[in-house]
Amino acid sequence: MHVIAKILLLIPILVSCGTPEDKRYRDTAMLERPPVLSTKKKSEEPHITDNSKITKKRHKTGLGPDVYMIESTPMLLKIKKPLDDAWRILESALKQSQIKIVDHREDKGLYYVYFKPKSLFENATSLFRKKDEDEHDEANYVLTVTADRDETKITANPFDASEQYSDEDVADSGSEALLWALYKTLHDDLKEE
């Protein structure tokens, strides 16, 4: 009997909890709403468009496509930089290539350098010899650095102190080897200082 009385009392309680018609939880009209902000711009403020770009470095080291060779007579090395920047970059490349700068005349755009093209045998034997950096005091090549519109061109010619350098000198294979050595350093291995 007690069980039946408990069930009869429990039924109306369960029925009152299950009615889906309770509107106080469905009506959201009384809830707080955020304020409406105006989206009109003041006519006095200028419209600014930022078209600047952050240039990404294409290569870890070296200038990459900003340096190239032109196979002509004499052979040319071109850097896509203004003359002042190219002068500084070329000096770094000469030092990193271990090409000795004997003298330079920035006002005339000339680097007097000592360069000895090495063969495969000389490269192998140089590992076992002691380096003497002050071994050579005379230049055997002259690099001419000149502006060419927005770029800078570099030529190499043999140099003999007894015969003064002239623009009509014809480059030899050593001059080409010098330019190729500089090209490889500038293109792939140039480190920022």
Image (tube, rainbow, N blue to C red):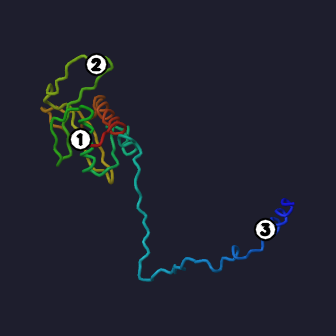
Question: Measured along the vertical axis of the image, is residue 40 above or below residue 157?
Answer: below
**Residue positioned 33% across, 53% down in the render:** 150
Q: On the picture, is 164 further left or further right than 11?
A: left
Label 2 element class: helix
Question: Measured along the vertical axis of the image, is residue 4 above or below residue 164?
Answer: below
Residue type, mark 3 in image: Ile
Label 1 element class: helix
Q: Which mark is residue 122?
A: 2
Farthest residue to the bottom: give it.
Answer: 43
Residue type, mark 1 in image: Glu
The residue that disc 1 covers is: 91
Q: Nearer the viewer, residue 68 or 54?
A: 54
Mark 2: give few (<14), some (14-19) or many (20+) Cα within 10 Å.
Answer: few
The residue that disc 3 covers is: 13
Frontmost of labels 2 and 3 is 3
**Residue positioned 34% across, 36% down in the render:** 189
Mark 3: give few (<14), some (14-19) or many (20+) Cα within 10 Å.
Answer: few
**Residue positioned 82% across, 62% down in the render:** 6
Q: Which of marks 3 and 2 precedes in the sequence?
A: 3
Which image quarter: residue 149? bottom left
